[in-house]
Amino acid sequence: MNWQSDSNDIETLFAPVLERWYEHNKRDLPWRHTNDPYRIWLSEIILQQTRVAQGKPYYERFVAAYPTVADMARADERELLRLWQGLGYYSRARNLHQTARYVTDKLAGKFPNTYHDLLKMKGVGTYTAAAIASFAFAERVPVVDGNVYRVLARVFGIEEDITTTTAKKLFAALAMRLIRSADDPAVYNQSIMEFGAIHCTPVAPDCLLCPVQQKCVAYLTGRQHKLPVKAKKAPVRERFFNYFIFQHNGRIALRERTARDIWQNLYDFYLIETDEPKTALRDILLSESVNTILEKGTLLTPPTELVQLLSHQRIRAKFYRIDLPVEVINSLPTGLQWYFPEEINDLPKPVLVTNYLDNQFG
């Protein structure tokens, strides 16, 4: 299907053109072979965190562990967090668990079947609600995510900053007009998302073989790399973690992070956070009780340094591995407990901690 000469046809032909492109170019993904709202919801929550290639194994592991929403509702939260490990934003995993319980206990295991009712569920925003509503229930409601913003901004030459409320309303209205020309709202939504993901990409869009090239404002004006317009990200916050890995007779001391901070409900080591990097152990301000433990212990290796970049934070961690004698193993700081390696494998942990353990004890 080609564009007609009349520029007014662009909105009418946009959906059919993309649907035809999708028919020939779509990737074979497991969540595209179902209209089960549970599995669609699960895939969308996971794909908020990572790209398809990285998200697919997580999806398959979750489906294997929890084939139905009732199975997830009955899950142990610690095990669910362990399966989520590596995706980040662990609050989304906890929302996943709470929503599964809500659907199972309050809705008799049936997901809401409309966009507006889906929005009432914890952790489900406008994009996820639209995806579930269209893919599972064929509701004619458009998805608008980063890929969609990029495609629409380029094709229609929209220069509004996509982070603003005005732009969000503008894109939402355009997306709603476009989906009205679609034969199937589910196929259309998949089409535009897939087109943005693998064809109209952020850095190297395939303009030469683009089915909308003749009407794409960005292509015709040479602005592919200037659209969409997006405000600069907030500066990354630097944080400095000093970890103390206390060990004795094959066991290692870890604690659960309970504060409302990154990695809540995950397990790590005894931690002292400082405002700036400390070059030596003696420069770290410690309590008298911890100093007593350190005086009795033996530093086994030079400190190891690792870095993890989160969305708005950079964690620079230094790890001190210390062997403790028997007389102080019951005097650990509050919250620390002793675990054998096989027990630690079953604990949900930040990627930073997992990487350290793999490097030092793997």
Image (tube, rainbow, N blue to C red):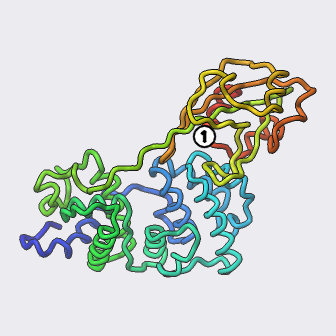
Residue 316 in percent (x, y) is at 56, 33
Q: Position of residue 61 (x, y in %)?
A: 61, 52
Where residue 230 appears, as percent x and y from the top left, is: 30, 55
Camera-nearest residue between 209 and 126: 126
Q: Position of residue 2 (x, y in %)?
A: 14, 66
| Label 1: few (<14), some (14–19) or many (≥20) C-alpha neighbours in 10 Å | some
Q: Residue at x 69, y 26 (%)?
A: 320
Q: Quarter of the image containing the N terminus? A: bottom left
Residue at image x 42%, y 80%?
139
Q: Residue at x 27, y 54 (%)?
A: 200
Q: List the residue tagged with mark 1.
A: 351
Task: Please tell me in which quadrant of the rendered image residue 215 appears.
Answer: bottom left
Q: Is residue 101 visible?
A: yes
Q: With 272 as the anchor, is 139 left or right in this view?
A: left
Count of numbered tags: 1
State whether residue 309 appears in this view.
Answer: no
The local secondary structure at tag 1 comes to: helix
- Seen at 55% across and 77% down, the residue is 120
